[in-house]
Amino acid sequence: MKNLFNNLNEIDYYFDNKKYVIRDIFDINKRSEMIDKYLNNIEYYIIHEIKDGDKWEYIAKKYYGNSNMKMFWIFIIMNEIEDPFFDFALTVDELGKATRYTEENSQISFDLFENAINQNDEKRFIKILKKEYIKNFENDFFKEIV
């Protein structure tokens, strides 16, 4: 696992004003100005509406082909996703399970469900880097984190 993150900085942690240096923890949240270049210019991306059942890998396959199914990491970066499992639009079934209805709290449950639907709908539209910019994006990204 360490090889994957060799180019990222190690992090010094401070707890209760005491400095702890942890040697095997890497700063995977490093923010890159290069990413803003792609995020802020519509020339580089298209908008995709996530449908029920879509998964990161299938969207990558649709736009980038079979050999590039693992390129979904670009979507995660392009959409500033912090948690690729929970920041992805849920299916109707998953949404229902996440906001369980109970008879005792029917109004509260309905309000939570309605709020969850609204938040989920906002996640349905994601930026997809156009295929012709993948190599440039990768090169810029890896130059930036070195």
Image (spheres, rainbow, N blue to C red):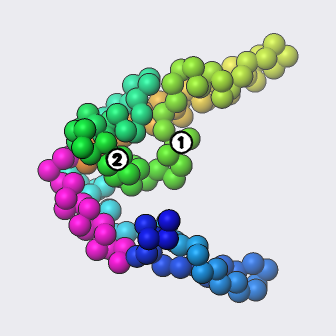
Q: Nearer the viewer, mark 2 or mark 1?
A: 2
Estimate how packed mark 1 is, as few (under 14), some (14 to 19) or many (20 or more) residues with alpha carbons within 10 Å.
few
Q: Amino acid at mark 2?
A: Lys
32 over 95 or under it: above or below: below
70 over 24 or under it: above or below: above
Q: Is residue 132 left or right of residue 139?
A: left
Quarter occupied by residue 57: top left
For the record, the magenta segment spans 130-146
In magenta segment, residue 144 = yes
Picture residue at 51% right of the left edge, 24% below the top: 91
Q: Sequence-wise, which precedes: disc 2 or disc 1?
A: 2
Q: Amino acid at mark 1?
A: Phe
Picture residue at 32% right of the left edge, 73% below the top: 144
Label 1 SS: loop
Q: Main secondary structure of the magenta part?
A: helix
Q: Is residue 67 left or right of residue 111?
A: left
The residue that label 1 is drawn on is 85
The residue that label 2 is drawn on is 70
Marks 2 and 1, how far apart in space? 15 Å
Of residues 81 and 71, the one nearer the viewer is 71
Q: Quadrant of the C terminus?
A: bottom left
Q: Could you tell me if residue 114 is visible in this image?
A: no
